[in-house]
Image: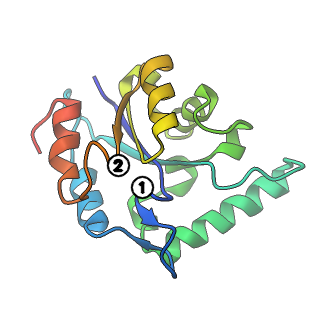
Amino acid sequence: MIKALLLDLGDTLIDTHKVPQAPYPGVEKALGALKALKTADHKPLVMCLVSDYTMPKPRTPDAIAAAFAEYLQVLDKTHLRGFFEPVNERVTLSTHAGKLKPAAEVFKTALKRAGIHGTLRETLFITENAEHIKVCRDDLHMKTLQFGVDFTSWSDAPKLIAQKIGVAA
């Protein structure tokens, strides 16, 4: 049973090639619908961001906090922060884990930060990155959807995600 939805931000939820960066069409409506989804056991589906945003060197607590603050500014500018509150639980940067995606430690750190008592097999990860999809699906045994391949419009996402987690949209 899927307990958590882990989402990539850059080139999955927001178009990083656009100036200024902005969500893809339909993202905000889709995230609103996804926030209302329940798991198969009727508990809220936990929705989190997992990002390789930056890996400061040296990776000190102050550097991690600065990178996180910068990332939150991106969420504020794209008006997506509200979907991932409280951000200290629902937003995980690779630097929090000390590894880059698709390392298992990154996703496990995201589950821990969100207070989810579950395994990677109980997560659905969405990204545009084909390499990350392959590793997450084949090596980490996560459920995956690839933006741009499995779906190209965020207006289609809530129904597809509901099907993937086994509930009605």
Whichever of labels 1 and 2 marks the residue nearer the N terminus, that label is: 1
Residue carrying label 2:
147
How busy is the neighbourhood of tag 2: few (under 14 within 10 Å), some, or many (20 plus)?
many
Residue 13 figure quarter: bottom left
Q: Secondary structure at mark 1?
A: loop
Res. 115 in view: no
Residue 84 in picture, x, y percent from top left: 44, 57
Give, as a three-letter code, the residue at label 2: Phe
Q: Residue at x 76, y 53 (%)?
A: 64
* Crowd rating for badge 1 (residues with CA inside 10 Å; few <14, some 14–19, many 20+): many
**Residue labelled with disc 1:** 12
Depth check: give the residue in front, 36 or 79.
Answer: 79
Give the amino acid type for the residue marked by disc 1 in the picture.
Answer: Thr
State the residue lying farthest toward the left.
168
Return the mark for residue 128.
none
Structural distance between the alpha carbons of marks 1 and 2: 6 Å
